[in-house]
Image (cartoon, helix red, strand yellow):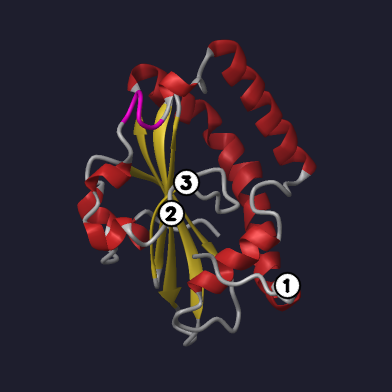
Amino acid sequence: MRLPLTAHTRRPWRIHELAPDFRTEDVWAFRTPGAGPGELGVMLAAMRAGGGFARQSPANRFLFAVRWKLGALLGWDRPEAGLGTRVRSLRDRLPRELSDTVDATTPDGLPLTPVYRLEDEYVGELANRTVHTLMHLGWVPTDKGEYELRMAVLVKPNGPLGRCYLTLIAPFRYLIVYPALTRQWEQAWRDRRLLLADGTGPLG
């Protein structure tokens, strides 16, 4: 479910002090019935075990295939356009107590570089020729006495190219990508006991 931007910006997340130069682009909520405090790690582990971004709907796979093809043709995803080259990683801004919470060299099942992880907050990032993007995942109490996952996408467009790119892909995000992601992640939560029965622990 899409939420107003204030659903993210008005909460006291650590990301606000670390990335004031990024704008909040999208905020979505994912239903996790029965969830309690401290279970963000369980949700992340279920997302990873359930395929992360790799197990997408046919429509999403097609859109991403087109995007990667365009990126290859136009040079959007070359190493020199990414983290540590075109832009500095957000990890360079972190205090030690945050930078030590994840291993940025270890894949976490998401197409992102981990930045930090707290009990109720996770941040990953990626960068290319068009944009530097942060994905913020928060674990938020609801008025039903449970918790839900919220995703905020924060962006720093790379000039006119980046702003044009975000405008062009907005309809696809809202009509195809995010609804499919909602179904996938909510299913991962419902299947968490089965997915994690092989001993896969919460994402560290």
Q: Which residue position is annotated with label 2?
A: 103
Is 85 included in the stretch rendered in magenta?
yes
Q: Nearer the viewer, mark 1 or mark 2?
A: 2
Q: Does label 1 or label 2 sit earlier along the sequence? A: 2
Left or right of 128, for residue 92: left
Q: Does label 3 or label 1 sit earlier along the sequence? A: 3
Please say whether residue 164 is visible from this viewpoint: no
Please say whether residue 181 is visible from this viewpoint: yes
Q: Nearer the viewer, mark 3 or mark 1?
A: 3
In this picture, is 106 found above or below 48? above
Left or right of 107, for residue 48: right
Within the image, what quadrant is residue 69 found in? top right
Q: Which residue position is annotated with label 1?
A: 191
Distance CA(mark 2)–CA(mark 3): 5 Å
Magenta-highlighted residues: 83-87
For label 2, the SS is loop
Tag 2 near tag 3, CB within 8 Å = yes
Mark 3 surroundings within 10 Å by alpha-carbon count, few (fewer than 14), some (14 through 19), many (20 or more): few
Distance CA(mark 1)–CA(mark 2): 27 Å
In this picture, is 204 found above or below 172? below
Q: Amino acid at mark 1?
A: Asp
Residue placed most toward the observer, 108 or 136: 108
Q: Which mark is residue 105?
A: 3
